[in-house]
Amino acid sequence: MSVAAMGRKNPTQPTKTCHCQRAQLSARIETDPTCIHTTAQPKPANPTPNPLTSLPTVLLLVHTHPLYPVPPQPLSPERGAAQRVPNPLMDAASRTWPPPNPSPAPFSSRLRVSSDSHRRRRRRHSKKSKPEPPPPAPPKSAPVGSGSDFADLPQELLHRALSASSTADVSAASRACRAWRDALQPLREAAALHAHGRRLKHGPAVPAPCGVEGRDVARRSALGMFQRAARLGSAAAMVDAGLLCWEEGQREEAMGYYQRAAELGHPVGMCNLGVSYLEADPPEAEEAVRWFYPAASAGNVRAQYNLGLCLQNGKGIKRNQREAAKWYLRAAEGGNVRAMYNVSLCYCLGEGFTQDHVRAKKWLQLAADCGHKKALYECGLKLCAAGDKIRSFMYLELATRRGEAAASHMRDVMLESLSPMNTQLALSEADKWRPKALYTRR
């Protein structure tokens, strides 16, 4: 039963519409936005028959909407100018909910059109204003000498930075720019002189009536080349010049060359300077350790081995067996044969490292294969204890040839227990033996 029929006693009887009800409906049509018409229109004189303009059909379309808030009321099509009385049911003060917006029925084919304000609101929120890009900053001119250009570097700084570099590094830096090529011209000349001096020192002797005199002439010529290259700023030439002066007995002059090369950062120059302080009279162990540390940190294996010796014996520094074993291991990994033997002793005795006989045997065998005389002697003893007399005799023979005094007595003892054929086989193997060549870091 509809809400409109609830007020009638008999819903089946037609309802009579009074003038008061027509006035109330006329007032609601003017004020309610949910109706089809927003204002009342005057009736034309001769209306044309149209089914949509008949009021019962229009009210039926309006009141049957599912969101219509007020129950439908019948109204005659005649609209008079009667006094309009406000409807208490539709009074704004008595409403408890806002009037719903007109919307199409569910599953309707009509498109839902939003209001103009909603459309403007969506347009305002959808179009985001893009921030204007900031104006480009004016380019700043780099000050001269700030390092922005290779050519701005001072020539003295560039010359000093590359004086301890190799020939390949100097050549590569000379191709960077014209300013570098001009600044490194003295170092390239020094590299050529140094290479020629090394060929004179290590190459065939200069032809002379006597071979010894020819060798002396070659060494003096090489020293002259090294000195010229050292005056041009080559640190490697300073090291070789100091070495020749040391061999000639000119130790003060040699230490001067080593000092200049060490100040330029050459690792071999720092190591040789430390050795010179150790062999001075009296020895200056603290000064030697001061130069061994930077050379060892730079990767020079001889400096690492000498630093390990100083730490083990407490020369110029507090005794520290653990640090000594660490530097021995680094030097052994770099190819130093003496360091390999010392590492095997550290693992065998448990000094500085945890005792490990497997690693001790590995490092001892590697030192013997590289030609260390004490390692050859100890390997010969181990092979003799294991029953391999032929290889034991070969290792003892190799150690004797390299100057190990204790190996000669054991070799004679082994010779009495071997047959002539086995002795000849061991000697032939010793003649064909060659030490293992390892790359040693300088």
Image: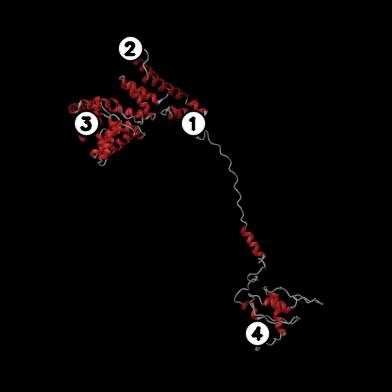
Q: Position of residue 332 (x, y in %)?
A: 31, 34
Q: Vertically, is 329 above or below 166?
A: below
Q: How is the image coloured?
A: secondary structure
Residue 362 place in picture, x, y as percent: 28, 37
Q: Which residue is mark 4?
A: 5
- Closest to the observer: 119 or 420? 420
- Which comes before the other along the chain, label 3 or label 4? 4
Between tags 2 and 3, which lies in front?
Answer: 3
Closer mark to the observer between disc 2 and disc 4 = 2
In the image, 386: left or right of 208?
Answer: left
**Label drawn at residue 153:** 1
What is the number of the mark on residue 389?
3
Residue at the (36%, 23%) spot, across then down: 240
Residue at the disc numbered 2: 210
Side of 37 where 372 appears, left or right: left
Residue type at tag 4: Ala
